[in-house]
Image (cartoon, rainbow, N blue to C red):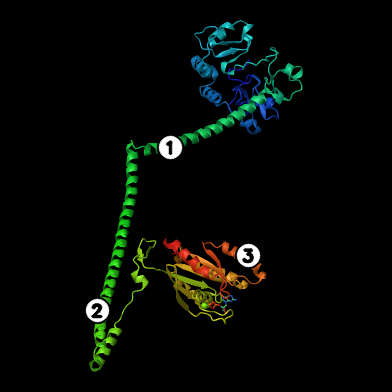
């Protein structure tokens, strides 16, 4: 007879110690069988069919040892062992422990609806409480009915809709059957409408579906956690930002205050700059008025003197011969002294009523026609810097001039548009390159010259340029790289491409220029390019 705590397949007792008698849960349906029965049923398969309801259970990792043990049952067996075995346990405790799970199903007893069923009689097809089970099966014949705990009640088989005496065992996989019920019984498969159709076991189909649903469930659970977390964050942010909440209004007030402070400081700085700018303009206008007034006074004095001298001389002209000769020396001295009076004729700039001014980046007002800027020319020796400066200064140069390296530097001032450019032409000999930093440290623009014919020196030129531009002092200084001696032999084209790609790869912004100091080509555009760079830098425009 089946032990009260035994496997319903082999009828042997479960055991805590014997691994072959360990109770294993068939997770697909919930039934429990012992390890050795499970081994026999599963064979070499990676899934196992329940001997009671044919539900399939996947063996995790294809290994039976990974199938969950029925720990509740094992605990119960241990408890029983601790208290001296089943026979020594009191009836109440034994029943309570044994049927607790079945009672949880809360199914009414078919004999007495007041009772909770704990058994299922597989022959009578009825749910019974333990007392009614004993009572209704007390005869010799009925006592042989197989009764299983209610939790192990076999799941009812699904019958085929077309062949009601056949159980649904397969699922049709033909696409053409998508619109009809894909469930098939043996009859449907072998003789019916699914004859010859591709099909799988219903257990396999359900297992696959369950697996897929489990995966979806896992994914959805993860998504729902993410959504939940995002919602919480949004809610707390909304709470903090909502003006009605105490925290929100406090934070908002703080932020508002710092924005207002920022603009308050900007406004007051701008107000001061405006006052300074207007004072500068006022001072300049006053100085100009004073100087014009002084010039006017001097000219009026000269005019008065000229007027009186003219009257004296006109009167002298009508004097008698002897009288005029008598006054000869005085008259000539008067005429000459009046003539010698300085008459400062004002130039056009002094008479211009529109005052020229510009603003630098620091919002300072600069009055005058010219904005001063220091432009430093750098480049290897012989690259053509001095020749370019001479061209800019419109100094006549011969097409072929003997090389004359600059030892130190030359400064030339060039007026172009509203700029006064102090151009520093620095010698490029190797021994002078260490001194370059002293010249470029205050530069507003760097003009770097590369000799377009000195192919063998391209790498050296790029290396020196990189060295200069890596100085933090030049971080925002505009750079123009000029390729001098443009044009020329087409054999240079390949090398020029290499130079161009080297220039493109430079890690700082720069502008390119092509010129030929000997021919004079590309020279006029140099000043335009420099002043555009400068105006971009200080927020003015070349006019
Ligand atoms: N053919 C040709 N020769 C040029 C050109 N530019 C400069 N040269 C010649 O190259 C030589 C050197 O020119 P410089 O202007 O003195 O060179 P640099 O860059 O001032 O040299 P350092 O002062 O030593 O740094 C001179 O003989 C120039 O005539 C050019 O565009 N074409
Ligand atoms: Mg030179």
Residue 419's x, y, as percent?
43, 68
Name the secondary structure under disc 1: helix
Answer with left or right where residue 404 lies relative to residue 314: right
Q: The C terminus lies in which quarter of the figure?
A: bottom left
Upstream in sequence: badge 2 or badge 3: 2
Residue 232's x, y, as percent?
43, 35
Q: Which residue is mark 3?
A: 497
Mark 2 vs mark 3: give the one in front: 2
Q: Which one is in front, 209 or 314?
A: 314
Q: Is residue 211 visible?
A: yes
The residue sitting at 59% across, 64% down in the picture is 502
Q: Quadrant of residue 215?
A: top right
Q: Is mark 2 within 8 Å of ligand 2?
A: no
Above/below status of 528 relative to 239 = below
Above/below status of 390 relative to 70 = below
Q: Which residue is mark 1?
A: 234
Q: Quadrant of residue 198?
A: top right
Q: Quadrant of ligand 1?
A: bottom right
Q: Which residue is mark 2?
A: 304
Answer with left or right where residue 511 lies relative to residue 243: right
Instruction: Specify few, some or many for label 3: CA neighbours under 10 Å numbering under 14, 14-19, or 20 or more.
Output: few
Upstream in sequence: badge 1 or badge 3: 1
Upstream in sequence: badge 1 or badge 2: 1
Q: Is residue 470 visible?
A: no
Farthest-out residue, top: 139
């Amino acid at each position: 007879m089946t032990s009260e705590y035994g496997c319903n397949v082999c009828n042997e007792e479960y055991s805590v110690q014997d691994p072959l008698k360990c109770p294993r849960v068939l997770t697909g349906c919930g039934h429990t069988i012992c390890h050795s029965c499970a081994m026999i049923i599963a064979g070499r398969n990676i899934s196992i069919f329940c001997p009671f309801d044919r539900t399939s259970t996947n063996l995790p990792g294809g290994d039976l040892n990974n199938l969950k043990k029925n720990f509740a049952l094992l605990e119960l067996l241990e408890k029983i062992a601790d208290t001296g075995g089943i026979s020594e346990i009191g009836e109440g405790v034994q029943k309570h422990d044994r049927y607790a799970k079945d009672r949880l199903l809360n199914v009414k007893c078919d004999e007495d609806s007041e009772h909770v069923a704990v058994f299922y009689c597989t022959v009578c097809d009825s749910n019974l409480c333990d007392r009614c089970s004993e009572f209704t099966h007390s005869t010799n014949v009925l006592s042989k009915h197989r009764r299983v705990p209610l939790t192990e009640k076999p799941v009812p088989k699904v019958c085929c809709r077309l062949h009601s005496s056949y159980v649904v065992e397969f699922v049709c996989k033909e696409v053409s059957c998508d619109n009809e019920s894909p469930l098939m019984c043996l009859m449907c498969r072998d003789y019916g409408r699914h004859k010859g159709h591709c099909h799988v076991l219903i257990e396999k189909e359900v297992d696959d579906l369950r697996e897929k649903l489990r995966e979806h469930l896992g994914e959805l659970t993860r998504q729902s956690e993410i959504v939940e977390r995002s919602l919480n964050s949004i809610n707390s942010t909304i709470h903090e930002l909502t003006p009605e909440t105490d925290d929100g209004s406090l934070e908002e007030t703080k932020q508002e205050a710092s924005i207002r402070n920022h603009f308050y400081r900007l406004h007051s700085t701008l107000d001061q700059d405006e006052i300074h700018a207007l004072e500068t303009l006022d001072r300049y206008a006053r100085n100009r008025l004073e100087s014009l007034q002084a010039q006017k006074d001097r000219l009026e004095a000269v005019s008065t003197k000229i007027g009186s001298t003219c009257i004296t001389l006109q009167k002298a002209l009508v004097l008698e011969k002897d009288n005029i000769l008598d006054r000869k020396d005085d008259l000539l001295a008067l005429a000459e002294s009046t003539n010698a009076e300085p008459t400062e004729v004002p130039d056009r700039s002094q008479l211009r009523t529109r005052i020229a001014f510009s603003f630098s980046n620091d919002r300072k007002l600069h009055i005058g026609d010219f904005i001063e800027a220091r432009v430093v020319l750098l480049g290897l020796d012989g690259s053509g810097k001095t020749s370019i400066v001479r061209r800019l200064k419109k100094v006549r140069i011969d097409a072929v001039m003997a090389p004359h390296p600059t030892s130190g530097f030359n400064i030339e001032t060039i007026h172009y548009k509203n700029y006064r450019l102090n151009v520093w032409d620095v010698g490029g000999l190797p021994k002078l390159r260490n001194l370059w930093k002293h010249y470029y440290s205050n530069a507003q623009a760097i003009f770097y010259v590369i000799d377009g014919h000195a192919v063998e020196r391209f790498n050296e030129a790029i290396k020196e340029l990189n060295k200069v531009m890596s100085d933090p002092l030049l971080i925002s200084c505009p750079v123009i790289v000029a390729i001098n001696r443009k044009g020329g032999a087409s054999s240079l084209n390949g090398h020029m491409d290499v130079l161009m790609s080297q220039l493109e790869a430079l890690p700082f912004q720069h502008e390119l220029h092509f010129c030929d100091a000997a021919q004079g080509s590309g020279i006029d555009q140099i000043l335009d390019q420099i002043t555009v760079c400068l105006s971009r830098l200080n927020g003015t425009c070349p006019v």
